[in-house]
Amino acid sequence: MSEQPAAVDLVDIWKRFPGVIANAGANLTVRPGTVHAVLGENGAGKTTLMNVLAGVYRPESGSVLIGGHEHAFANPAAAIDAGVVMVHQEFRLIPTFTVAENVALGQSPRILAKRSIEESVGELAERFGLATEPDKEVWQLSMGERQRVEILKALWRDAKVLILDEPTAVLTPDEATELGRIVAAMAADGRSIIFISHKLDEVTAFCDEATVLRGGSTVAASLPVQDIDAGRLAELMVGEATEVSIRRQRTTEIGPAVLSLEGLSVRDDRGVAVVNGVSLTVGAGEIVGIAGVAGNGQRPLADAVAGLQQLEAGAIALSGDDVTTAPPRTRSGAGLAYVPEDRLGVGLAPKLNVVENSILRSYRSLKKGPFIDQGAATAACEGLIDEYNVKVGKLDAPMAGLSGGNLQRLLVGRELADDPIVLIAAQPTRGLDVQGVAAIQEILVDQARSGTGILLISEDLDELLALSDRLLVMHEGSVVAEFDPDDVTRAEVGAAMAGAH
């Protein structure tokens, strides 16, 4: 008897977007009745590859096989017809509809009595241990309960392959544990689950096999999870050592602390702790790097320091002055600059033009009466463009028209224009080409040399090892390790990123 074909076989998938190769010959094989993790840092190509499988994107080349049969999905509906359903991070539910109505919406071939739908949904939920109330409206549900509704929708459509994109990102720890049980029940029923996650402890607890993507390519395929620890998975995700564009000579003349964090704790909008008692200092002229698998509290920590995220507890000081309760404008005036990881969503205003974006930090000093002095604003913008080698077209054109590298150059230049005492730089080179990476790294090194203290948050371990004077590692919202970048191995950093203290 021939061997059962793979539930999913993605072969040599290529997908490009303007200026970006998202998938570069990626491969994935998922066996029937298994839970298969797809791992990789942000930008590794995971979501793009899953969108190809789910019919959202069509690949430029490569093959998509489901149960041994090749498909070319024109849209998600075609993928659903073939038994492939994706549960996205952002739930797609109608809050004023009941659970049963959301589950059956668009899928019932004929008008059914409300009671009949509720009974059918209830039976399906009971079969897989998905505790829910079919007659309850979705707006009344917790995030964990809403996720169960999304899974019920997939099962109602008889999904043979279920893709869960960061399924525990919105769940409490107890809800995440419950999800693990539900996933196991679906696999025991013969379905194949693809589990996209950054949380390596959940991968080792829930999954049978794992595939790791890096730079759009598959670097490790179908690894048996029981035979590999989380530290090795983290090491595969961050990659082997590669040549970096600049290697900084460490400074031994670090000045007094310009940034002090004491016991910072933050909860997200769901009340879940995302930063847990973080304490650290950054000295004048020092670059302190923070490493960690994405989603372990780095972004809320940076936002909290910048004043964009409310603290639950803790204190923040700039050069000894307490700014814990100060608004972002006051922190900026006290010498804090922030380059957020979401350059267009948070750092810049895409619909404003180049000049307007370049003066967002300094416009108060450019006023003539109640209005902005347009001549002074344009001159300031042109000075920034010249100093940081920003390639732009018309200065009155919307900011969103610039390339990623030029967006980042302008953002970094704007934040450094007033010689801040502290710079928070979160993922400052993500998505840039080689020249763009080199330019931003050189700017950071020069700024540290001038005396600015820099907190550098990056998912590029080579960058952190090359630029940092000290390297901290965050895991589950806490700083769990501190290393000398000149005296640590990638394996040691990887183990800390996976939670080995």
Image (cartoon, rainbow, N blue to C red):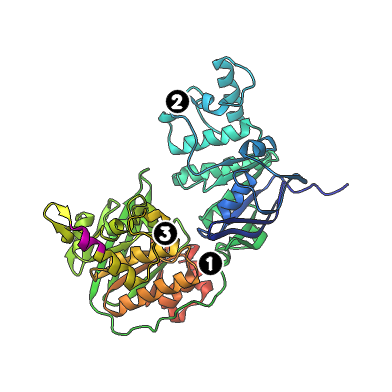
For the point 63% across and 39% down, the residue is 75
Classify residue 488 as left or right of residue 423. right
Q: Quadrant of residue 330?
A: bottom left
Q: Quadrant of residue 426?
A: bottom left
Task: From the image, state whether disc 3 or disc 1 is nearer to you.
Answer: 3
The answer to whether residue 332 shows anywhere in this view is no
Looking at marks 3 and 1 on the same chain, the residue that comes earlier in the sequence is marked by 1
Residue 42 drawn at (x, y percent): 50, 58
Instruction: Find the distance from the CA under tag 2 to the CA under tag 3.
Output: 44 Å
> Which circle marks residue 238 in the picture?
1
- Asked if disc 2 and disc 3 are in contact, CB closer than 8 Å, the reply is no
Residue where numbered disc 2 is placed: 137
Looking at marks 2 and 1 on the same chain, the residue that comes earlier in the sequence is marked by 2
Instruction: Find the distance from the CA under tag 3 to the CA under tag 1.
Output: 29 Å
Residue 419 drawn at (x, y percent): 24, 71
Residue where numbered disc 3 is placed: 402
For the point 49% across and 73% down, the residue is 462
Amino acid identity at mark 1: Val
Magenta region: 373-378
- Asked if disc 2 and disc 1 are in contact, CB closer than 8 Å, the reply is no
316 is within the stretch colored magenta: no
Q: Quadrant of the C terminus?
A: bottom left
